[in-house]
Protein backbone atom coordinates (compact mmCIF):
# COMPACT_ATOMS: atom_id res chain seq x y z
CA UNK A 1 0.00 0.00 0.00
CA UNK A 2 1.30 3.38 -0.96
CA UNK A 3 1.87 5.97 1.76
CA UNK A 4 0.46 8.51 -0.68
CA UNK A 5 -3.17 9.49 -1.04
CA UNK A 6 -2.51 11.30 -4.32
CA UNK A 7 0.27 10.78 -6.87
CA UNK A 8 0.46 13.00 -9.92
CA UNK A 9 3.00 12.74 -12.73
CA UNK A 10 3.45 15.17 -15.58
CA UNK A 11 -0.21 16.14 -15.61
CA UNK A 12 -1.21 18.32 -18.54
CA UNK A 13 -4.65 19.79 -19.22
CA UNK A 14 -5.37 21.77 -22.36
CA UNK A 15 -8.53 23.65 -23.26
CA UNK A 16 -8.21 23.77 -27.04
CA UNK A 17 -4.82 25.37 -27.70
CA UNK A 18 -4.54 26.80 -24.21
CA UNK A 19 -2.49 24.81 -21.70
CA UNK A 20 -4.06 25.49 -18.28
CA UNK A 21 -1.95 22.85 -16.45
CA UNK A 22 1.56 22.45 -17.82
CA UNK A 23 2.97 19.10 -16.72
CA UNK A 24 2.79 19.15 -12.93
CA UNK A 25 4.01 16.39 -10.61
CA UNK A 26 3.41 16.11 -6.87
CA UNK A 27 2.48 13.68 -4.11
CA UNK A 28 0.16 14.09 -1.15
CA UNK A 29 0.79 11.88 1.88
CA UNK A 30 -2.07 10.10 3.59
CA UNK A 31 -3.49 12.12 6.47
CA UNK A 32 -1.96 15.46 5.56
CA UNK A 33 -3.57 18.75 4.62
CA UNK A 34 -2.07 19.77 1.30
CA UNK A 35 -2.78 23.20 -0.21
CA UNK A 36 -2.51 24.47 -3.75
CA UNK A 37 -1.81 28.17 -3.35
CA UNK A 38 -1.88 30.51 -6.31
CA UNK A 39 -3.56 33.49 -7.91
CA UNK A 40 -6.78 33.32 -9.89
CA UNK A 41 -6.33 31.44 -13.15
CA UNK A 42 -3.21 29.55 -11.98
CA UNK A 43 -4.85 26.21 -12.83
CA UNK A 44 -5.89 25.09 -9.35
CA UNK A 45 -9.54 24.35 -10.11
CA UNK A 46 -8.61 22.59 -13.34
CA UNK A 47 -6.26 20.30 -11.38
CA UNK A 48 -8.97 19.56 -8.80
CA UNK A 49 -11.41 18.75 -11.57
CA UNK A 50 -8.96 16.27 -13.09
CA UNK A 51 -8.23 14.67 -9.71
CA UNK A 52 -11.93 14.33 -8.95
CA UNK A 53 -12.60 12.77 -12.41
CA UNK A 54 -14.74 15.65 -13.69
CA UNK A 55 -12.23 16.45 -16.42
CA UNK A 56 -9.96 14.09 -18.34
CA UNK A 57 -6.28 14.99 -18.40
CA UNK A 58 -4.73 15.74 -21.80
CA UNK A 59 -1.70 13.70 -20.75
CA UNK A 60 0.09 12.48 -17.64
CA UNK A 61 -1.10 10.29 -14.81
CA UNK A 62 -2.99 10.80 -11.56
CA UNK A 63 -3.61 8.15 -8.91
CA UNK A 64 -6.15 9.16 -6.28
CA UNK A 65 -6.86 6.91 -3.28
CA UNK A 66 -5.04 4.10 -5.08
CA UNK A 67 -6.99 4.36 -8.36
CA UNK A 68 -6.22 5.84 -11.75
CA UNK A 69 -8.52 8.81 -12.47
CA UNK A 70 -8.86 7.87 -16.16
CA UNK A 71 -9.20 4.08 -15.94
CA UNK A 72 -11.04 3.74 -12.63
CA UNK A 73 -13.11 6.91 -12.19
CA UNK A 74 -15.94 5.17 -10.28
CA UNK A 75 -13.54 3.73 -7.71
CA UNK A 76 -11.99 7.19 -7.26
CA UNK A 77 -15.41 8.82 -6.83
CA UNK A 78 -16.45 6.37 -4.10
CA UNK A 79 -13.40 7.28 -2.03
CA UNK A 80 -13.45 11.06 -2.30
CA UNK A 81 -15.59 13.94 -1.11
CA UNK A 82 -15.75 17.27 -2.90
CA UNK A 83 -16.75 20.80 -1.93
CA UNK A 84 -16.84 22.95 -5.03
CA UNK A 85 -16.18 26.66 -5.29
CA UNK A 86 -19.75 27.32 -6.41
CA UNK A 87 -22.62 26.23 -4.17
CA UNK A 88 -24.06 22.86 -5.16
CA UNK A 89 -26.69 22.29 -2.48
CA UNK A 90 -30.35 22.60 -3.48
CA UNK A 91 -31.56 25.86 -1.98
CA UNK A 92 -35.27 24.93 -2.20
CA UNK A 93 -34.73 21.89 0.03
CA UNK A 94 -34.01 21.82 3.75
CA UNK A 95 -30.57 21.03 5.14
CA UNK A 96 -31.81 17.60 6.20
CA UNK A 97 -33.29 16.82 2.78
CA UNK A 98 -30.05 17.79 1.05
CA UNK A 99 -28.14 15.43 3.30
CA UNK A 100 -30.69 12.64 2.89
CA UNK A 101 -30.71 12.73 -0.90
CA UNK A 102 -26.92 12.79 -1.08
CA UNK A 103 -26.79 9.79 1.27
CA UNK A 104 -29.27 7.86 -0.88
CA UNK A 105 -27.18 8.61 -3.99
CA UNK A 106 -24.26 6.93 -2.24
CA UNK A 107 -26.41 3.92 -1.36
CA UNK A 108 -26.83 4.75 2.33
CA UNK A 109 -30.18 4.34 4.07
CA UNK A 110 -32.10 3.38 7.20
CA UNK A 111 -30.87 4.20 10.68
CA UNK A 112 -27.27 4.29 9.54
CA UNK A 113 -28.00 7.26 7.27
CA UNK A 114 -30.14 9.01 9.91
CA UNK A 115 -27.42 8.67 12.53
CA UNK A 116 -24.75 9.95 10.15
CA UNK A 117 -26.85 12.96 9.15
CA UNK A 118 -27.43 13.84 12.80
CA UNK A 119 -23.77 13.44 13.73
CA UNK A 120 -22.54 15.53 10.79
CA UNK A 121 -25.13 18.30 11.09
CA UNK A 122 -24.19 18.56 14.76
CA UNK A 123 -20.51 18.61 13.80
CA UNK A 124 -21.02 21.70 11.62
CA UNK A 125 -23.48 23.19 14.13
CA UNK A 126 -26.49 23.09 11.80
CA UNK A 127 -28.62 20.48 13.58
CA UNK A 128 -31.04 23.04 14.96
CA UNK A 129 -31.51 24.44 11.45
CA UNK A 130 -32.04 21.04 9.83
CA UNK A 131 -35.65 21.71 8.77
CA UNK A 132 -35.00 25.15 7.30
CA UNK A 133 -34.79 25.70 3.56
CA UNK A 134 -31.20 26.26 2.49
CA UNK A 135 -32.15 29.50 0.71
CA UNK A 136 -32.58 31.09 4.16
CA UNK A 137 -28.97 30.21 5.11
CA UNK A 138 -26.00 32.61 5.16
CA UNK A 139 -23.03 31.88 2.89
CA UNK A 140 -21.11 30.40 5.83
CA UNK A 141 -24.00 28.10 6.79
CA UNK A 142 -24.29 26.87 3.20
CA UNK A 143 -20.58 26.12 3.07
CA UNK A 144 -20.83 24.21 6.38
CA UNK A 145 -23.72 22.18 4.95
CA UNK A 146 -21.65 21.38 1.86
CA UNK A 147 -18.80 20.20 4.08
CA UNK A 148 -21.15 18.02 6.16
CA UNK A 149 -22.66 16.57 2.99
CA UNK A 150 -19.26 15.78 1.50
CA UNK A 151 -18.42 13.70 4.60
CA UNK A 152 -21.54 11.49 4.54
CA UNK A 153 -19.95 8.58 2.70
CA UNK A 154 -16.78 8.82 4.83
CA UNK A 155 -14.34 9.72 2.07
CA UNK A 156 -10.64 8.95 2.38
CA UNK A 157 -9.75 12.22 0.68
CA UNK A 158 -11.65 15.47 0.82
CA UNK A 159 -11.21 18.06 -1.94
CA UNK A 160 -12.04 21.64 -1.03
CA UNK A 161 -11.87 24.21 -3.83
CA UNK A 162 -11.45 27.66 -2.23
CA UNK A 163 -13.38 26.62 0.90
CA UNK A 164 -13.71 30.10 2.40
CA UNK A 165 -13.93 32.32 -0.66
CA UNK A 166 -16.26 35.26 -0.08
CA UNK A 167 -16.77 34.54 3.63
CA UNK A 168 -16.14 37.00 6.47
CA UNK A 169 -13.03 36.50 8.64
CA UNK A 170 -14.91 35.02 11.60
CA UNK A 171 -16.72 32.46 9.47
CA UNK A 172 -13.48 31.61 7.69
CA UNK A 173 -11.77 30.88 11.03
CA UNK A 174 -14.75 28.69 11.96
CA UNK A 175 -14.43 26.66 8.75
CA UNK A 176 -10.70 26.25 9.37
CA UNK A 177 -11.58 24.69 12.74
CA UNK A 178 -13.86 22.15 11.04
CA UNK A 179 -11.19 21.28 8.50
CA UNK A 180 -8.62 20.69 11.24
CA UNK A 181 -11.10 18.65 13.27
CA UNK A 182 -11.97 16.55 10.22
CA UNK A 183 -8.36 15.72 9.65
CA UNK A 184 -7.85 14.76 13.32
CA UNK A 185 -11.10 12.94 13.98
CA UNK A 186 -11.55 11.17 10.67
CA UNK A 187 -7.88 10.68 9.84
CA UNK A 188 -8.60 12.11 6.43
CA UNK A 189 -6.40 13.53 3.71
CA UNK A 190 -7.44 17.04 2.74
CA UNK A 191 -6.54 18.67 -0.57
CA UNK A 192 -7.50 22.30 -0.75
CA UNK A 193 -6.99 25.12 -3.18
CA UNK A 194 -6.78 28.70 -2.06
CA UNK A 195 -5.51 32.09 -3.10
CA UNK A 196 -5.54 33.22 0.55
CA UNK A 197 -2.06 33.08 2.02
CA UNK A 198 -3.32 33.02 5.59
CA UNK A 199 -5.50 30.04 4.78
CA UNK A 200 -2.60 28.03 3.37
CA UNK A 201 -0.41 29.04 6.28
CA UNK A 202 -3.02 28.25 8.96
CA UNK A 203 -4.14 24.92 7.59
CA UNK A 204 -1.62 23.25 5.39
CA UNK A 205 1.04 20.76 6.41
CA UNK A 206 2.52 21.25 2.95
CA UNK A 207 1.91 23.75 0.19
CA UNK A 208 2.47 23.72 -3.57
CA UNK A 209 2.62 27.22 -5.00
CA UNK A 210 1.08 27.32 -8.44
CA UNK A 211 1.41 29.98 -11.10
CA UNK A 212 0.53 29.95 -14.82
CA UNK A 213 -0.18 26.22 -14.78
CA UNK A 214 3.09 25.21 -13.09
CA UNK A 215 4.16 24.32 -9.56
CA UNK A 216 6.89 26.82 -8.81
CA UNK A 217 7.69 25.71 -5.24
CA UNK A 218 6.62 23.08 -2.76
CA UNK A 219 7.23 22.49 0.95
CA UNK A 220 6.05 23.18 4.48
CA UNK A 221 5.19 26.84 5.18
CA UNK A 222 8.54 27.17 7.02
CA UNK A 223 10.53 25.58 4.19
CA UNK A 224 8.94 27.93 1.67
CA UNK A 225 9.70 30.99 3.76
CA UNK A 226 13.32 29.95 4.02
CA UNK A 227 13.53 30.38 0.23
CA UNK A 228 13.25 34.12 0.73
CA UNK A 229 16.13 34.21 3.16
CA UNK A 230 16.56 36.27 6.25
CA UNK A 231 14.24 37.93 8.72
CA UNK A 232 14.70 41.67 8.85
CA UNK A 233 14.93 43.93 11.91
CA UNK A 234 14.44 47.70 11.45
CA UNK A 235 15.83 50.11 14.04
CA UNK A 236 15.60 53.84 14.47
CA UNK A 237 18.67 55.08 16.34
CA UNK A 238 19.10 58.36 18.15
CA UNK A 239 22.38 58.76 16.25
CA UNK A 240 22.09 56.90 12.89
CA UNK A 241 25.91 57.02 12.45
CA UNK A 242 26.14 54.56 15.38
CA UNK A 243 25.17 51.92 12.82
CA UNK A 244 28.90 51.15 12.34
CA UNK A 245 29.04 49.83 15.92
CA UNK A 246 26.41 47.17 15.30
CA UNK A 247 28.82 44.32 14.66
CA UNK A 248 28.09 40.80 15.82
CA UNK A 249 28.19 37.37 14.22
CA UNK A 250 24.39 36.95 14.46
CA UNK A 251 23.93 40.08 12.30
CA UNK A 252 24.36 38.97 8.70
CA UNK A 253 23.91 42.35 7.10
CA UNK A 254 23.55 45.89 8.35
CA UNK A 255 22.86 49.09 6.45
CA UNK A 256 21.46 52.55 6.85
CA UNK A 257 18.35 53.12 4.71
CA UNK A 258 17.60 56.44 2.98
CA UNK A 259 14.70 57.04 5.39
CA UNK A 260 17.11 57.00 8.33
CA UNK A 261 16.23 53.54 9.61
CA UNK A 262 18.80 50.81 10.05
CA UNK A 263 18.14 47.46 8.43
CA UNK A 264 19.60 44.32 10.01
CA UNK A 265 19.43 40.93 8.29
CA UNK A 266 19.18 38.13 10.84
CA UNK A 267 18.26 34.46 10.76
CA UNK A 268 15.47 34.68 13.31
CA UNK A 269 14.12 38.09 14.28
CA UNK A 270 12.45 37.07 17.54
CA UNK A 271 15.70 35.51 18.82
CA UNK A 272 17.89 38.35 17.51
CA UNK A 273 15.95 41.28 18.98
CA UNK A 274 16.96 40.85 22.66
CA UNK A 275 20.58 40.39 21.53
CA UNK A 276 20.40 43.59 19.45
CA UNK A 277 19.21 45.53 22.52
CA UNK A 278 21.96 43.98 24.64
CA UNK A 279 24.60 44.89 22.04
CA UNK A 280 23.24 48.43 21.74
CA UNK A 281 23.24 48.98 25.47
CA UNK A 282 26.82 47.66 25.75
CA UNK A 283 27.95 50.00 22.96
CA UNK A 284 26.06 53.01 24.32
CA UNK A 285 23.70 53.12 21.32
CA UNK A 286 20.21 54.45 21.94
CA UNK A 287 17.40 52.66 20.06
CA UNK A 288 14.29 54.81 19.61
CA UNK A 289 12.20 52.26 17.75
CA UNK A 290 12.49 48.62 16.69
CA UNK A 291 10.28 46.59 14.36
CA UNK A 292 10.82 43.34 12.54
CA UNK A 293 9.56 41.49 9.53
CA UNK A 294 9.43 37.74 9.04
CA UNK A 295 8.89 36.52 5.47
CA UNK A 296 5.28 35.72 4.62
CA UNK A 297 4.04 33.42 1.89
CA UNK A 298 3.33 36.59 -0.06
CA UNK A 299 7.06 37.39 0.13
CA UNK A 300 7.75 33.88 -1.14
CA UNK A 301 5.47 34.39 -4.13
CA UNK A 302 6.95 37.82 -4.76
CA UNK A 303 10.46 36.36 -4.52
CA UNK A 304 9.65 33.60 -7.00
CA UNK A 305 7.57 35.53 -9.54
CA UNK A 306 8.20 39.24 -8.98
CA UNK A 307 4.43 39.64 -8.51
CA UNK A 308 2.06 39.50 -5.55
CA UNK A 309 -0.76 36.98 -5.22
CA UNK A 310 -3.67 39.24 -5.77
CA UNK A 311 -7.30 38.46 -5.73
CA UNK A 312 -8.78 40.09 -8.78
CA UNK A 313 -12.25 39.49 -7.40
CA UNK A 314 -11.31 41.36 -4.22
CA UNK A 315 -9.76 44.06 -6.34
CA UNK A 316 -12.94 44.40 -8.30
CA UNK A 317 -14.81 44.63 -4.98
CA UNK A 318 -12.40 47.28 -3.72
CA UNK A 319 -12.78 49.20 -6.98
CA UNK A 320 -16.56 49.15 -6.65
CA UNK A 321 -16.32 50.37 -3.04
CA UNK A 322 -14.03 53.19 -4.19
CA UNK A 323 -16.44 54.14 -6.97
CA UNK A 324 -19.31 54.23 -4.49
CA UNK A 325 -17.27 56.39 -2.13
CA UNK A 326 -16.42 58.77 -4.97
CA UNK A 327 -20.06 59.00 -5.96
CA UNK A 328 -21.03 59.77 -2.37
CA UNK A 329 -18.38 62.46 -2.13
CA UNK A 330 -19.43 63.76 -5.56
CA UNK A 331 -22.96 64.30 -4.33
CA UNK A 332 -21.88 66.45 -1.43
N1 LIG B 1 -13.48 25.45 -19.76
C1 LIG B 1 -12.45 26.25 -20.03
N2 LIG B 1 -12.15 26.61 -21.28
C2 LIG B 1 -11.10 27.40 -21.57
N3 LIG B 1 -10.24 27.91 -20.63
C3 LIG B 1 -10.49 27.59 -19.36
C4 LIG B 1 -11.60 26.75 -18.98
N4 LIG B 1 -11.57 26.62 -17.63
C5 LIG B 1 -10.51 27.33 -17.19
N5 LIG B 1 -9.86 27.92 -18.22
C6 LIG B 1 -8.65 28.74 -18.12
O1 LIG B 1 -7.63 27.95 -17.56
C7 LIG B 1 -6.84 28.72 -16.65
C8 LIG B 1 -6.84 28.05 -15.30
O2 LIG B 1 -8.14 28.14 -14.73
P1 LIG B 1 -8.50 27.54 -13.30
O3 LIG B 1 -9.95 27.80 -13.05
O4 LIG B 1 -8.04 26.16 -13.23
O5 LIG B 1 -7.59 28.44 -12.37
P2 LIG B 1 -7.66 28.62 -10.79
O6 LIG B 1 -6.28 28.71 -10.33
O7 LIG B 1 -8.52 27.60 -10.18
O8 LIG B 1 -8.38 30.02 -10.63
P3 LIG B 1 -9.79 30.30 -9.98
O9 LIG B 1 -9.58 30.25 -8.52
O10 LIG B 1 -10.13 31.67 -10.50
O11 LIG B 1 -10.75 29.23 -10.50
C9 LIG B 1 -7.43 30.11 -16.64
O12 LIG B 1 -6.66 30.90 -17.53
C10 LIG B 1 -8.83 29.92 -17.18
O13 LIG B 1 -9.27 31.06 -17.86
Image: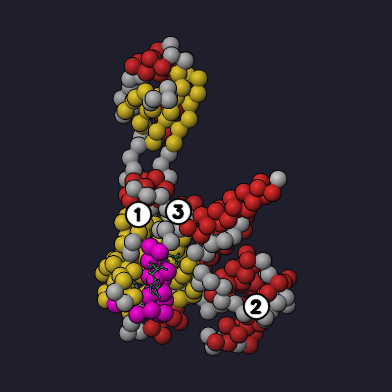
Q: At 33% from the left edge and 22% from the top edge, which residue is drawn?
A: 248
Query: In the shown orientation, is residue 207 left or right of residue 93?
Result: left
Q: Residue 239 in the image: x percent, y percent?
A: 43, 14
Q: Secondary structure at mark 1?
A: strand
CB atoms of marks 2 and 1 within 8 Å: no
Q: CA distance from mark 3 to mark 2?
A: 31 Å
Q: Earlier in the sequence, mark 3 or mark 1?
A: 1
Image disc number at residue 310: 3
Q: Is residue 238 magenta?
A: no
Q: Earlier in the sequence, mark 2 or mark 1?
A: 2
Q: At 27% from the left edge and 74% from the top edge, which residue is drawn?
A: 60
CB atoms of marks 3 and 2 within 8 Å: no
Q: Which residue is mark 1?
A: 219
Q: Quadrant of ligand 1?
A: bottom left
- Looking at the image, which residue sits at the far front? 331
Q: CA distance from mark 2 to mark 1?
A: 39 Å
Residue 42 position by quadrant: bottom left
Residue 30 vertical placement versus 228 (above, below): below
Image disc number at residue 91: 2
What span is colored magenta in the figure? 41-58
Query: In the shown orientation, is residue 100 left or right of residue 229?
Result: right
Q: Residue 129 in the image: x percent, y percent?
A: 72, 72
Q: Secondary structure at mark 3?
A: loop
Nearer mark to the viewer, of 3 and 2: 3
Q: CA distance from mark 3 to mark 1?
A: 21 Å
Residue 242 vertical placement versus 134 (above, below): above
Q: Residues within 10 Å of mark 2 (few under 14, many from 20)?
A: some
Q: Is mark 3 within 8 Å of ligand 1?
A: no
Amino acid sequence: MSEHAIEVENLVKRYGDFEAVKGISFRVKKGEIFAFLGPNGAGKTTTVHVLTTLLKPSSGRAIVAGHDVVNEPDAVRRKIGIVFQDPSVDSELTAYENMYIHGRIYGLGGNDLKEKIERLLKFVELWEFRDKQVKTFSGGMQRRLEIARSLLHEPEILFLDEPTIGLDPQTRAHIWDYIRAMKEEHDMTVFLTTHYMDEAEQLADRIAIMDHGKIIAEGTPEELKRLVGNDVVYLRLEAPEDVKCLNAEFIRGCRLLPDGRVRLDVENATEALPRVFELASRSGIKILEATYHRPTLNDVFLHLTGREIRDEADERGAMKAKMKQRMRFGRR
